[in-house]
Amino acid sequence: MIRRLLIRIALLLTVCPLLTAFSAHAHNLGSQPNNLSNDTNKPHQQATASAKQHWSESAQEILMNALSLTGIQYKYGGHSPETGFDCSGFVRYVFQQAANMSLPHNAKAISQVGEVISRDQLKPGDLVFFNTMRSAFSHVGIYLGNNRFIHAPSSGGGVHVVDMNAQYWAKRYDGARRIDPSAAQ
């Protein structure tokens, strides 16, 4: 138990600078200067800034929730800290708890939700997908930033953070999705 707590503290210390940078970036997105001379776009700009702020807060909650589950053991079909997690159960649990979002039951189905984004557009809180079973979109994790993601692997212990540039993950990368914050309800 103490070991798990120490691992969580170490991960939080590693990820907190990412969260701070992400929060500052999201804040700047909502406060970009407006070059338009009329006020016809103000309601749209305010709604966009509000959505970005909502996602910034949701993404921080998602990351903190995900990191708090570090070390929970893998279990095929698992969907809670008490039962253990498989990859999709982990992602579903985190998004439900942190952002009140209900996601489908497997990685392939989750890969159909949200907006497709390129790897260079990844932001903390996005979902990353991998081909780990000779099947597209067979594994899912949550992007943390700095080419790292957190997931529930079927081997190697419980929920933990890995580098997407590691050879195994780099050659199996399938793509990424960003879930629309307005989907939460």
Image (cartoon, helix red, strand yellow):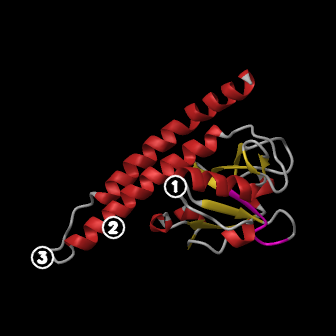
User: How far is mark 2 from mark 1, CA to CA?
Assistant: 18 Å
Q: Which one is nearer the viewer's eye here, 95 or 128?
A: 95
Q: Tag 3's secondary structure?
A: loop
Q: How crowded is mark 2: few (under 14 residues within 10 Å), some or many (20 or more)?
A: some
Label 1, on which residue?
99
Q: Are marks 2 and 1 in contact (CB under 8 Å)?
A: no
Amino acid beneath label 2: Thr
The image shows residue 152, relative to residue 183, as above or below, that is above
Image quadrant in which the N terminus is located:
top right
Write the start and end of the magenta stretch as one range.
Answer: 135-141
The image shows residue 116, relative to residue 170, as above or below, that is below
Q: Residues within 10 Å of mark 1 (few under 14, many from 20)?
A: many
Q: Residues within 10 Å of mark 3 (few under 14, many from 20)?
A: few
Query: Residue at 59% across / 67% down in the picture?
Result: 177
Label 2, on which residue?
48
Residue 125 locus on image (x, y percent): 55, 55
Amino acid beneath label 1: Ala
Observer able to see residue 164: no
Q: Tell me which numbered mark, 3 or 2, is placed earlier along the sequence.
A: 3
In the image, residue 139 lies in the stretch drawn in magenta: yes
